[in-house]
Image (spheres, grey):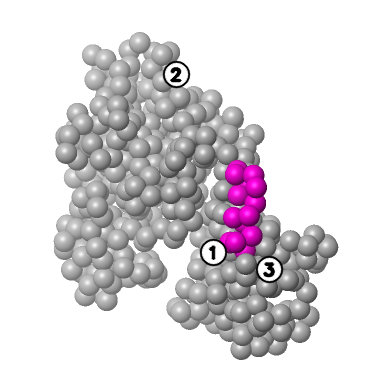
Amino acid sequence: MGAMNAPTPRQPHRPHVRNAILHLWRRAVVSQGFATDLISQEFRRNRQLGSHDRREAAETLYSMLRNWRRLTWALGRFLQEGQSDELRDFALYMAHCVTSGLVSPEGAAESFPGPDWAAVSRLDARIEAVGDPVTRFGLRHSLPDWLAAKLIDQLGDGAEALAAALNQRAPLTVRANTLKVSRDELASRLLDEGVETTPTRHAPDGLHFASHINAFALKSFREGLFEVQDEASQLASLLVAPPPGSVVVDLCAGAGGKTLSIAAQLRNKGRVLALDVHSDRLKELVRRARRAGTSNVKSMQIPPDVFPAPVEAMTGRIARVLVDVPCSGLGAMRRNPETRWRLKEEELGQLPPLQEAIARRGISLLGPGGRLVYATCTLFCEENEAVVERLLAADSSLEPVRITEIWGKDFATPLCDPTGYYLKLFPHVHGTDGFFAAVLRKKR
């Protein structure tokens, strides 16, 4: 296949960039890793790529992952004829170029004869002619039919705007480490480093970068002045609202984004116990905590079903517990576009029992008046409201807390559902990742 080794000027990427894209695509297709991690690994391996090349490669990979169903459907019969992996990958890459307007159908035909590139270029019009509304919605937004049907069922008229927002690139958002710097001071420091920012709309310590750059290479990052954290995650961390000098348990701490935010809220007083079943994530948390200058964080790996003795001894004594439970991840699909292809409908039924079990473990730690924050980065009712309602129904010692009680009416109202009990964030409404949180209090 000559086009692979001798690209014509009609192909928009230089050979080494195109080869990196195809290599990343193949790894993403066969791997269960996140595209973000695969890109980082590739860029460390491939020193030939400059900053502009890296941006092109990353943006193209993300676009191809988002639009996989659309591209496959656009190529139709060509892919159905049983192509090799190499030909299939290159055809999908060229289909991306044609549907993005980077290459004309005629130019694509010269570079790679075989597919009907004229039909590929008419993709949107062909989709709108599809009769079944669920299939049409799924093709329009490049979602599997089961997920398209679920969004339509749960969000009704809002499904269209949400699906479109999930296909947009998420902003690069950071949280100022207020142990070292204010948001305004961080913005000034970043501007000195050539980085323009704007304040986040809701989170008081957040900044959006004006462009996607390697934030981890900045001197201000190495000095611990900020953490990369979406605005929704920042808001969920603020919902913990720990009393001064208190003990907080982050039960699903992961790599510690929310842990560090809580530590900063405590001004390095009290204690934040970061628990997780994955030791590798906790190692990253320890590195981040060291860079951030936090001294009140202790991490501990725990088994999935019982608390170790030091944690068990805290039962009934903790002021705040955060459980950011494993979930389907729909709300973070802007950042993890591969989620839509890896998530299976049958797996959704397995998540609520796990989420409820984790929340019950967290509830057992609460002292009188203590609060549990239940959080997910998904928007499905069965992982959110339904779990909270079962927790309340099963334990009469719990009561729900209105978000306005924690944040005040002006701050909380735009971020909550009509009842005022649930934090519900949507990409198309708030500009954040999709996120849900509820606060449950142990009665005194």
Q: Nearer the viewer, residue 381 or 113?
A: 113
Label 3 SS? helix
Quarter in which the N terminus is drawn: bottom right
Can you tell which mark lies on residue 119? Answer: 3
Query: Do residues under tags 3 and 2 come within 8 Å of each other at their CB atoms?
Result: no
Give the amino acid at mark 3.
Ala
Can you tell which mark lies on residue 63? Answer: 1
Can you tell which mark lies on residue 390? Answer: 2
Label 1 SS? helix
Cα distance between the residues tagged 1 and 2: 39 Å
Sequence-wise first label, 1 or 2: 1
Res 38 visible: no
Cα distance between the residues tagged 1 and 3: 20 Å
Label 2 SS? helix
Residue 427 position, x and y percent, is 39, 49
Q: Residues within 10 Å of mark 2 (few under 14, many from 20)?
A: few
Q: Is residue 173 above or below residue 364?
A: below
Residue 61 position, x and y percent, is 56, 66
Magenta range: 123-136
At x 21%, y 63%, the residue is 186
